[in-house]
Image (cartoon, helix red, strand yellow):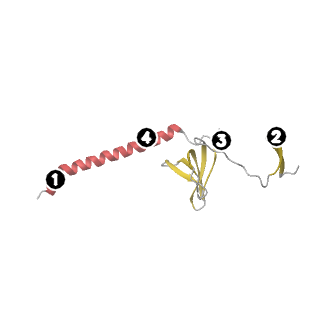
Amino acid sequence: MSETKRIIEVAGVKLEVDLKEAKTIENYKVGDNVKVLVKKYDNDYRSYPGVIVGFDKFEKLPTIIIAYMESGYDPDLEFVYLNSQTKDVEITHTQPEEILLKREDTINEFDKRIEAKENEIKDIKRKKNYFIKYFNQYFKK
């Protein structure tokens, strides 16, 4: 048997497969952990941890919906819609031993961002109250 041909058995039927022509079929389901390879700038590709959150069974363009976490200074939850028209995005299964994302670190990062926005809202409310209190004279005729 040559290096490019192999005999496999499927349901009791032996088949000779030419590995040059064989295709790998990936199976994905909702909830699967994946890595998402996304093109950012020029030829800069980044890999992010993600999870499959849904499948849209559109007749003309079936789509896999994937949520992924961009890491770095300001991590954020992003979505990608993967179908035959999607460019510059690939996915692959995450291996069980890979830990690409730490739950507590990510939650802490979101909590920090929430606190910062809540402080920003408080500041805007203080400015509004100051305006109401001290600028009333400005609007009197």
Disc 3 secondary structure class: loop
| Residue found farthest to the right | 1
- Few, some or many residues within 10 Å of mark 3 (<14, 14–19, 20+): few
Along the line of sight, which residue is nearer the eye, 7 or 96?
7
Looking at the picture, does residue 140 appear above or below residue 32?
below
Q: Are marks 4 and 1 in contact (CB under 8 Å)?
A: no
Residue 136 tag number: 1
Disc 2 secondary structure class: loop
Disc 1 secondary structure class: loop
Question: Residue 114 occupies which quadrant of the picture?
Answer: top left
Q: Are marks 2 and 3 in contact (CB under 8 Å)?
A: no
Question: Which residue corresponds to mark 2?
Answer: 12
Work out how far the residue at label 1 is from the one at label 2, CA to CA, in angstroms: 88 Å
Residue 95 tag number: 3
* x 46%, y 39%: residue: 108
Question: Which residue corresponds to mark 4?
Answer: 111
For residue 70, say whether it is visible: no
Image check: 117 left or right of 31?
A: left
